């Protein structure tokens, strides 16, 4: 599977700049889980975060829904923190609710799920972390040395 087609930087930048509502499928109440940290980060940066987890009623102070079909508002991004084999069903729901984009976190790679979403008119980003991409493109990683607005391959000193 060619993942490069699902990691287009212009698509990632556009959607991060225009999205307002992000449904996080598989959001956990456990503060040590990556899904919790990403949800917290996104909420802190101004996105409306909608938890989707059938085992919970509230996460991050937001009402939690058992499935995407139960969410009563339009969703710009469906961010998936589930096993890859769950992706086709989630993609079908994303198409049904007319989500703007299906975002599959690191390791969530499923060709059938991507095809279902694309065939239904939903864009796909796969095997990328939305928090990392947001930090990279909206300038939040400068202190780590990323996005320094300086690109060079020139080495200093003797060569």
Image (cartoon, rainbow, N blue to C red):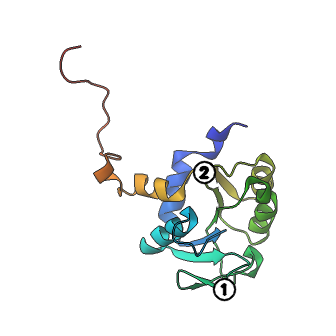
Measured from the top left, where is residue 4 in percent x and y?
62, 39
Q: Which mark is residue 57?
A: 1
Give the quarter of the figure containing the N terminus: top right
Label 1: element kind: loop
The dot on residue 106 is 2
Q: Quadrant of residue 49?
A: bottom right
Coordinates of residue 122 in the picture (x, y in percent) = 71, 59
Using the numbered discs, state the Cα–Cα distance from disc 2 to disc 1 in whole angstroms: 26 Å
Q: Position of residue 99 (x, y in %)?
A: 69, 67
* Front position in the image: 40 or 126: 40
User: Which numbered circle lies on residue 139?
Assistant: none
Residue 21 picture location, percent across and down: 57, 73
Q: Relative to 157, does residue 83 appear above or below in the rendering?
A: below
Q: Residues within 10 Å of mark 1 (few under 14, many from 20)?
A: some
* Residue 77 in the image: above or below residue 150: below
> Would you say residue 120 is visible in this rendering?
no
For residue 157, what is the image quadrant?
A: top left
Label 2: which secondary element: loop
At horizontal 32% and vertical 49% (from top left) the residue drawn is 144
Q: Earlier in the sequence, mark 2 or mark 1?
A: 1
The single residue placed furthest to the left in the displayed view is: 157
Whether residues under marks 2 and 1 lie with C-beta atoms below 8 angstroms apart, the answer is: no
Residue 157 is at least partly visible in this image: yes
At x 70%, y 48%, the residue is: 109
The residue that appears at 31% across and 45% down in the rendered structure is 145
Q: Residue 86 vs residue 38: left or right?
A: right
């Amino acid at each position: 599977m060619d993942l490069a087609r699902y990691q287009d930087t212009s698509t990632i930048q556009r959607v991060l700049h225009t999205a307002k509502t992000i449904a996080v499928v598989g959001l956990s109440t456990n503060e040590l889980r990556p899904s919790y940290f990403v949800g917290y980060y996104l909420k802190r940066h101004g996105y409306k975060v909608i938890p989707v987890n059938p085992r919970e009623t509230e996460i991050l102070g937001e009402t939690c829904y058992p499935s995407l079909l139960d969410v009563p508002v339009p969703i710009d991004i469906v961010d998936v923190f589930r096993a890859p084999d769950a992706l086709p069903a989630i993609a079908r729901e994303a198409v049904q609710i007319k989500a703007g984009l299906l975002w599959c976190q690191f390791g969530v790679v499923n060709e059938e799920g991507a095809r279902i979403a694309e065939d239904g008119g939903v864009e796909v980003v796969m095997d990328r972390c939305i928090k990392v991409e947001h930090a990279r493109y909206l300038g939040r990683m400068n202190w780590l040395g990323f996005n320094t607005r300086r690109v060079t391959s020139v080495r200093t000193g003797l060569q």
